[in-house]
Image (cartoon, rainbow, N blue to C red):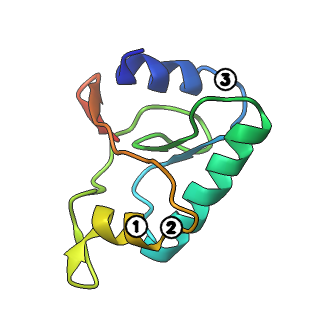
Amino acid sequence: MEVKQIVLDLCALNDEQEWFEFKENWFQPETLGEYVSALSNAAAFHYKKYAYFLWGIDNATHEVVGTTFNQYCEYNKEPYQNYLARNLSPSINFGFEETEIDGNHCI
């Protein structure tokens, strides 16, 4: 399924679920790793193939507002994605996908 459609489908739900999270620009490098682990566990518990952490979505209204979050940033002198992959234990397969919805950048 296309990333844009996944975002729109999740936004259409009444409430966030344990296996997906909405944020606009939030970024706390170490805490994000904890989120990834928790979302992954919740997805498995609810028999979901994937968990989602979506940037560019208003947490309260589920409106697509766009984000300035940069998944290519550096943290502790290395690319953040490398840092995250190296520090997740057990190792979790994850990826960042980008899309534009009504001119708003979402990740």
Q: Secondary structure at mark 3?
A: loop
Instruction: Judge the density around disc 1: few (<14), some (14-19), many (≥20) Cα neighbours within 10 Å.
Output: many
Circles 1 and 3, Cβ within 8 Å, touching? The answer is no
Give the residue at the far bottom of this rendering: 76
Q: Nearer the viewer, residue 90 or 32?
A: 90
Looking at the image, which residue is at 43% across and 16% down?
Answer: 5
How many numbered marks does the figure carry? Answer: 3
Circles 2 and 1, Cβ within 8 Å, touching? The answer is yes
Q: Quadrant of the C terminus?
A: top left
Q: Secondary structure at mark 1?
A: helix
Left or right: 61 with respect to 45?
Answer: left
**Residue 74 image-quadrant placement:** bottom left
x%, y% of residue 85? 39, 63
x%, y% of residue 82? 29, 66
x%, y% of residue 102? 28, 22
**Residue 22 image-quadrant placement:** top right
In the rendered view, would you say 11 is above or below 5?
A: below
Report the residue marked by disc 3. 13
**Residue 15 image-quadrant placement:** top right
Question: Would you say residue 17 is visible in this rendering?
Answer: no
Q: CA distance from mark 3 to mark 2?
A: 29 Å
Circles 3 and 2, Cβ within 8 Å, touching? The answer is no
Query: Disc number at residue 88?
Result: 2
Query: Disc number at residue 84?
Result: 1
Looking at the image, which residue is at 31% across and 56% down?
Answer: 69
Q: Nearer the viewer, residue 40 or 28?
A: 40
Q: Quadrant of the N terminus?
A: top left
